[in-house]
Image: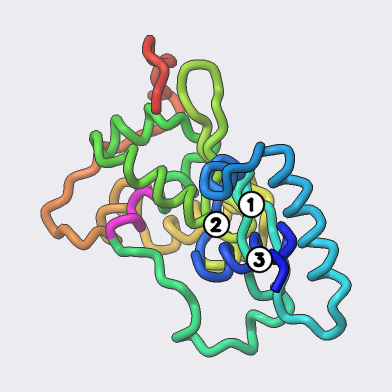
């Protein structure tokens, strides 16, 4: 049996991983340049799109690639099929949605050093975009985030408005909303307003 083509190998890896993966991860795993991996992913997406009646699509979410069910079919899936976000990540997710575009340094001010791990985990799940912005990172939500939380909007500014309206309806500030989602009942979260936006930190963040 001859070796499978790169798109086939990439499909197997992404299916088996069950999460989004970056070009860097796939390149390191397969020992191929990122350019070659990108071409392979593009060819795989074309193959998948050409399958008649297929339920899966290959998406590029904030620079990370993932195999997922087509949005128009998601309503047919049982609730138990939806991958859950670990509860420990919900406060960070709520704060990002509420304050986006949010500097990562802001989130660290509110949650402490654990914010770095939470940002990495949310990004690996394809739920947030963390783009380099000077010496910090600019955090925004993704389409996948909006779909997960049932937000009728996708563009991050509209997601922000929706989250703020939901919090207002519950009579909660952003910090109170985040704290209510935390598995740690004793968790304290610093309040933040746009007027408190910190200066970009001197050191480059992770």
The residue carrying pointer 1 sits among few (fewer than 14), some (14 to 19) or many (20 or more) residues within 10 Å by Cα, namely: many
Residues at marks 1 and 3, CA–CA distance in whole angstroms: 16 Å
Labels 1 and 3: the sequence-earlier one: 3
Q: Mark 1: which secondary structure?
A: strand
Residue 93 in sight from this viewpoint: yes
Q: Is residue 71 above or below residue 78?
A: above
Which of 46 and 13 lies nearest the eye of the viewer?
13
Q: Residue furthest front?
A: 1
Image depth: mark 1 or mark 3 in front = 3
Residue denoted by label 3: 11
Q: For residue 91: magenta?
A: yes
In the rendered view, does 24 fall on the left or right side of 108?
right
Query: x and y percent of residue 116 in the render?
Result: 34, 37
- Residue at (78% x, 47% y) in the render: 39
* Image marks 1 and 3: residues in contact by CB distance under 8 Å: no
Residue denoted by label 1: 61
* Image marks 3 and 2: residues in contact by CB distance under 8 Å: no
Query: x and y percent of residue 170 in the render?
Result: 38, 63
* Image marks 1 and 2: residues in contact by CB distance under 8 Å: yes
Q: Mark 3: which secondary structure?
A: helix
Q: Mark 2: which secondary structure?
A: loop
- Residue at (69% x, 64% y) in the render: 3
Labels 3 and 2: the sequence-earlier one: 3
Image depth: mark 3 or mark 2 in front = 3
Residue 140 in sight from this viewpoint: no
Which of 193 and 171 lies nearest the eye of the viewer?
193
Label the magenta part by its dominant secondary structure.
helix
Q: Is residue 165 above or below residue 196?
A: below
Where's the N terminus, which quadrant? bottom right
Image depth: mark 1 or mark 2 in front = 2
């Amino acid at each position: 049996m001859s070796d499978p083509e790169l798109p086939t190998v990439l499909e197997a890896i992404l299916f088996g991983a069950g999460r989004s993966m970056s070009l860097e991860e796939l390149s390191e795993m397969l020992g191929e340049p990122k350019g070659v991996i990108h071409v392979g992913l593009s060819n795989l997406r074309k193959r998948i799109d050409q399958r008649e009646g297929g339920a899966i699509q290959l998406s590029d979410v904030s620079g990370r690639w993932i195999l997922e069910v087509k949005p128009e079919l998601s309503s047919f899936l049982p609730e138990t099929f939806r991958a859950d976000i670990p509860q420990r990540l919900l406060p960070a997710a709520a704060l990002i949605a509420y304050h986006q575009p949010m500097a990562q340094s802001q989130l660290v001010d509110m949650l402490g050093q654990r914010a770095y791990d939470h940002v990495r985990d949310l990004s690996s799940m394809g739920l947030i975009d963390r783009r380099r912005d000077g010496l910090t990172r600019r955090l925004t939500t993704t389409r996948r985030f909006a779909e997960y939380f049932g937000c009728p909007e996708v563009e991050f500014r509209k997601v922000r408005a929706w989250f703020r309206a939901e919090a207002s309806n519950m009579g909660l500030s952003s910090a109170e909303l985040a704290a209510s989602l935390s598995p740690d009942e004793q968790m304290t979260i610093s309040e933040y307003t746009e007027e408190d936006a910190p200066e970009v930190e001197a050191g480059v963040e992770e």
